[in-house]
Every structure is written in C-alpha cells, then in structure tokens.
Image (cartoon, rainbow, N blue to C red):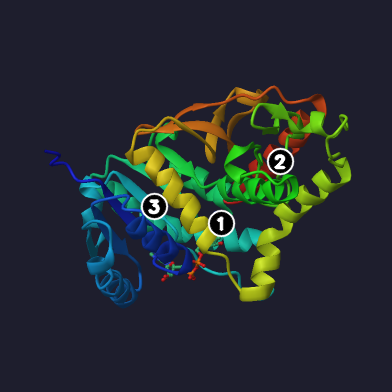
C-alpha cells in the first residue's frame, strides 16, 4: 500500500490558483493540497468551498489553508501569486513589484526545508521563473514555469479546428517568451507523422492548407490572452489545466514532453536564459531540454525572444 502522499502547496489563491486547485480535485492529481495566500481568510474560504465538493469527487483529498512551514514535505510548490498592473505602471515596475512578492514567498518556502520542485505561473512567467531559481538557490532543473504550455494548447486547438483533426494528434509547439515575442516553428509542426508544411502543397484529392491561414493562427495564439482579458478581465481555466498537466507529469514521473519555461545551458546556442522550450518532464523536474532542428529563420526568432527575456531579467535583480 502506498503511504507517501503526493502533496502540492499552492501559493496564491486567486483566479489562476483556484482554477488549478479545482482542476487538481476533479482530476484526482494529488492526495494533499495546502492553500497559502497573503490573504489568509480567502485561502480559508477557498479550502472550505473545495472541501464541500469532496463528497462528489472521484477520490479523497486533504485540502486545507496553511502556512509556508507546510511546504516542508511538499513534492511541488506552485506559485500563482502576483500583483496586478496599476494604471500607468510600466512593465518593468510591475516586474520589480512582483520580484518583491516572490522574495516574500521563496525565502520562507526554502526556510521550511522544502526539497521538491517549484512550478511558477505568475507573469511575466519566464522572468519570474528565473527569479525563483535565483532566490531559491535550487538546481535549475527543479525550477520550471508554465512557459508556452498554454500557448501550445491554444495552437493545437486552433490547428485541430482548421484541419478537422483531434488536437491531441496535432504535434506543434509555441516557443520562446510567453508573450509578444513567442513564435511557432512551423518546420517542426506535424499532424500525426505528416509535416504540416507538406500539407500546404495540395495533393490530388486533398484539401490545400494555406500558409497565410497558419500565420493567422499563430497571430491568434499570440493575441488570445488580450482577447480574453478584453472580454472577461482575466484568463484562468486554460492555465489551470496547463498547470495540472505539468503537475501530473511531475507527480507521475511521466517523462512527458511539454513546453515549459526552463533554463537553457547551451541548447539553441543560449546560456542561463529561461524560456519556453519543449522539455522532458518527470519527477526530477526538467529532465532535459529537447533541441529541435529549427530553420535559420526560426533560430533567429528564438534568439530574439531570448534577448527580450534576458533584458527583462537584467532590469529587475
Ligand atoms: P489574482 O489577483 O486573482 O490572484 C493573485 C493572488 O495572489 C491573490 O489571492 C493575492 O492575495 C495573492 N498574493 C498577492 N501577493 C501575495 C504574497 N506576497 N504572498 C502570497 N499571496 C499573494 O490574479 P490571477 O488572475 O489569479 O493571476 C495570477 C498570476 O497568474 C498573474 O501574474 C497572471 O498574470 C498570471 N497568469 C499567468 C498565465 C500563464 O500562462 N502563465 C495565465 C494567466 C494568468
């Protein structure tokens, strides 16, 4: 009988954090979930609300409002805490304030004796993941961010709609910054084992795929968050499910390939920068970064995105 419990500590019980927590409960991903927030009352209310759904859940789970000392035996600390941009505030000033928020989180988490894996969702996620690594002193393989996991899911959904194929049979990634400089390496996109670019050349009896439509889809993915925020002020269900998928890969020691924020150590000609790249994820965190054979043009797009991320990080710490 298994006695060690799969334990997740969630820091930040706002819209993103609680969408993730709700998804963990519905997909029976862990045995113990501790909710931590600077607003303790909110975390307590959220714990009560989730617990009241346990009678309808597929299996039991221990859910409670807690403190940083509860991170001591957690397998994963997931950070969704953050402050919102003030009117007129620059991106860099927001980053500096979020870096302060992270100082108030990472120090007590590491002081608790936590020896697991950090997963970060707070934006700008690539820079906040690098800050988490710097503040914790953890080996970079044990610090990952949600990166372009959500963007990749959006891409697969849109391609699935366009090509009339189940998104799970579409293999395509969004790489680089989770933000404006992200890009799709189309040379690496496949439907099952067939390169999507090959499908652009019409074969007899086949429907042709247009390059323009593919660029449109990439633009739609890049603009999706803005569009959702315009419509409903925030995005949270998609990221909640993306974080759940990453959590399953870690807790299940799956060796799954997911596009997360990871530190580059020479891959793609980059060093020290944290960016969204396809990685093999298992119980030790980022087991390895997959290096895709990008075209010259795609490699340039990736370096430009990394340059943006490097400059953002240098401005903060
Ligand atoms: P929210 O305002 O609803 O929740 C933030 C929570 O953080 C609040 O409960 C707040 O009390 C808590 N918090 C603030 N300072 C804290 C501190 N010092 N210690 C502990 N808790 C603290 O915001 P949200 O909509 O849940 O978004 C959270 C973050 O997730 C934002 O940075 C947002 O941009 C980001 N996000 C990321 C992605 C992604 O793909 N990575 C997608 C959507 C949103």
Q: Is residue 37 left or right of residue 14?
A: left
Ligand 1 within 8 Å, label 2 CB: no
Q: Is residue 208 left or right of residue 140?
A: right
Instruction: Please state the horizontal and vertical placement of residue 217, each as a whole percent of the image.
Output: 77, 50
User: From this viewpoint, is residue 24 visible?
Assistant: yes
Q: Secondary structure at mark 3?
A: strand
**Is the residue under label 1 in contact with that under label 3 (CB below 8 Å)?**
no
Kindly identify the residue that appears in the image at 21 percent across and 58 percent down.
60
Q: CA distance from mark 3 to mark 2?
A: 25 Å
Kindly identify the residue that appears in the image at 80 percent across and 44 percent down.
214
In the picture of the structure, the residue carrying the numbered disc 1 is 123
Whichever of labels 1 and 2 marks the residue nearer the N terminus, that label is 1
Task: Choose top left, top right, bottom left or bottom right for residue 50.
Answer: bottom left
Instruction: Please state the horizontal and vertical placement of residue 262, each as a whole percent of the image.
Output: 52, 36
The residue carrying pointer 2 sits among few (fewer than 14), some (14 to 19) or many (20 or more) residues within 10 Å by Cα, namely many
Residue extending farthest front: 205
Q: Is residue 316 left or right of residue 188?
A: left
Ligand 1 within 8 Å, label 1 CB: yes
């Amino acid at each position: 009988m298994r006695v060690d419990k799969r334990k997740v500590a969630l820091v930040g019980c706002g819209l993103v954090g609680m969408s993730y927590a709700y998804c963990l409960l519905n997909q029976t991903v862990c045995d113990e979930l501790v909710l931590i927030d600077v607003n303790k009352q909110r975390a307590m209310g959220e714990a009560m609300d989730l617990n009241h759904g346990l009678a309808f859940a597929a299996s039991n789970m221990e859910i409670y409002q807690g403190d940083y000392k509860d991170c001591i035996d957690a397998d994963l600390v997931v950070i969704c805490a953050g402050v919102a941009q003030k009117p007129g505030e620059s991106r860099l000033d927001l980053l500096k304030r979020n870096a302060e928020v992270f100082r108030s989180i990472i120090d007590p988490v590491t002081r608790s004796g936590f020896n697991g894996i950090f997963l970060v969702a707070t934006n700008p996620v690539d820079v906040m993941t690098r800050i988490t690594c710097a503040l914790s002193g953890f080996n970079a393989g044990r610090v990952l961010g949600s990166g372009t996991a959500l963007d990749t899911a959006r891409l697969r959904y849109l391609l699935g709609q366009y090509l009339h194929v189940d998104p799970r049979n579409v293999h395509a990634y969004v790489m680089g910054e989770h933000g404006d400089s992200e890009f799709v390496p189309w040379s690496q996109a496949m439907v099952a084992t067939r390169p999507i670019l090959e499908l652009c050349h019409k074969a007899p009896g086949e429907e042709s795929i247009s390059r323009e439509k593919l660029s449109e889809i990439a633009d739609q993915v890049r603009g999706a968050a803005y569009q959702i925020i315009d419509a409903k002020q925030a995005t949270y269900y998609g990221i909640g499910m993306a974080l759940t998928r990453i959590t399953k890969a870690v807790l299940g020691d799956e060796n799954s390939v997911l596009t997360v924020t990871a530190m580059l150590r020479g891959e793609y000609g980059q060093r020290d920068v944290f960016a969204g790249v396809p990685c093999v994820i298992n119980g030790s965190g980022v087991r390895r970064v997959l290096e895709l054979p990008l075209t010259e043009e795609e490699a340039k797009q990736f370096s430009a995105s990394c340059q943006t991320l490097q400059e953002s990080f240098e401005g903060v710490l």
